[in-house]
Image (cartoon, coloured by chain):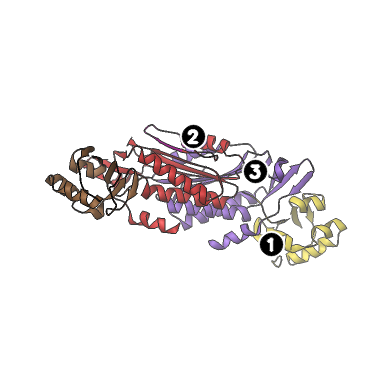
Chain colours: A yellow, B brown, C purple, D red
Amino acid sequence: MIEVLYFAWVRERIGIPRETVETEAATVAGLVDELRARAPRYAAAFADVSALRVALDQELADFGASLEGVREVAFFPPMTGG
Amino acid sequence: MIEVLYFAWVRERIGIPRETVETEAATVAGLVDELRARAPRYAAAFADVSALRVALDQELADFGASLEGVREVAFFPPMTGG
Amino acid sequence: MGTQTQAGGVRVQQGAFSPEGELTSFIAACKGAGAVVSFSGIVRNDAGGRLERMEIEHYPGMTERALEGIRAEALKRWNLTGAAIIHRYGPLVPGEVIMMVATAARHRREAFAAAEFLMDYLKSRAPFWKKEYTGDGAEWVAARDEDEAALGRW
Amino acid sequence: MGTQTQAGGVRVQQGAFSPEGELTSFIAACKGAGAVVSFSGIVRNDAGGRLERMEIEHYPGMTERALEGIRAEALKRWNLTGAAIIHRYGPLVPGEVIMMVATAARHRREAFAAAEFLMDYLKSRAPFWKKEYTGDGAEWVAARDEDEAALGRW
């Protein structure tokens, strides 16, 4: 059980801001593959992961990172603060 | 006839903030020589011109600069604003 | 609003703030500072003057952590007497102040460098996203490559 | 207080001013700016905490010309929507704000660079002199070689 959050246009494409996901994926990339398979709107949101960033438990991470012990995964586009 | 101004410790050593000077000096350096000869306090103020700056008509200049057409000469130490 | 012995801190809020008031209290809090640098980010009227409003989304929780982390890094790198970051989220209109950073140090070099560092990191490492609304619709602001590249300086 | 189409200007005054108020009106005047940088110089309590007061002498007439010149040069070098310089003279006590510069531009790089440029030139090219008073007496502040050297950057 992992909490998955979506922000900005990722949130808009998927249509929800967050959801609890049952996953056996070992890495972020594995989780992305599972999500893509759920529905076309997920496939659209994750079509190009190079346009995305991921945070694990609120720290920026890579798509190859392990999900072990992770409670919260967030997907979003590059940040545009300031 | 030229107006000569002194600032900061130059003013303090010479004892006055400004004076009108009758000079035939062609350059700032010539004027400095004339002033040095006036009294020991001038000699003390102008002992080391490398520690001084000069402005001609309110623009920074060199000690070799010509006094032709100049109405106001100011002597002061390096500036410490900000 | 301090998390360190140094003055300043991190604030993320929806409501407006006055850069003026923040600067005054920051200067008052920064004992021993000779130099205070502030940066204020303002909503430009881009999109050919057609920008009606902007909406800033953020990631509550991570935002504060990211800003605290960036501030702590600046305090480690420079000898600062204070560092503050304030960032708004929610709806904003052109001319409004989005965010502000302020740094204080004995000398100006450190204060300037630390303020630029805070801005560079905040731009690309704090989870904020801007959406611009014009009469034609809405669009997410794209990240600029030069903002990412700017991190290489530090 | 403008001498150019850009907002801002130059002011030399004995009385105190509020960096806060100045920043507010500067931001309001700088149409089209996305980035506003300010620098405030504060009287540090140096001399081992024994500084009682400071006296700033200046060269009326030349001061304004020098500051206008420095400001004009900054407006020429960077694409600014505004630049302001305010500098006090006369007696000041520790904690008081001596001077302030503010710059506004579309993007932060230009605003930061122009503010540092104004400060570097102001330090060594504007006719101000500081005298520090402690219980032991008074001393003129010596110019720092690194301030003169800083001009080589530009």
Q: Give the magenta-colored segment's residue range.
A: D10-20
Same chain, marks 2 and 1? no
Q: Position of residue D130 (x, y in %)?
A: 31, 43
How packed mark 2 is, by other alpha carbons closer than 10 Å (few <14, some 14-19, many 20 or more), is few
| Residue found 41% across the figure and 59% down from its top | D152
- Which one is nearer the viewer's eye here, D96 or A31? D96
Disc 1 sits on a residue from what chain?
A
Label 3 residue SS: loop
Q: Position of residue C25 (x, y in %)?
A: 48, 38
Mark 1, residue position:
A69
Label 1 residue SS: loop
Nearer to us: label 2 or label 1: 2
Image marks 2 and 1: residues in contact by CB distance under 8 Å = no
The quarter of the picture where residue A30 lies is bottom right
Q: CA distance from mark 2 to mark 3?
A: 23 Å
Mark 3, residue position:
C44
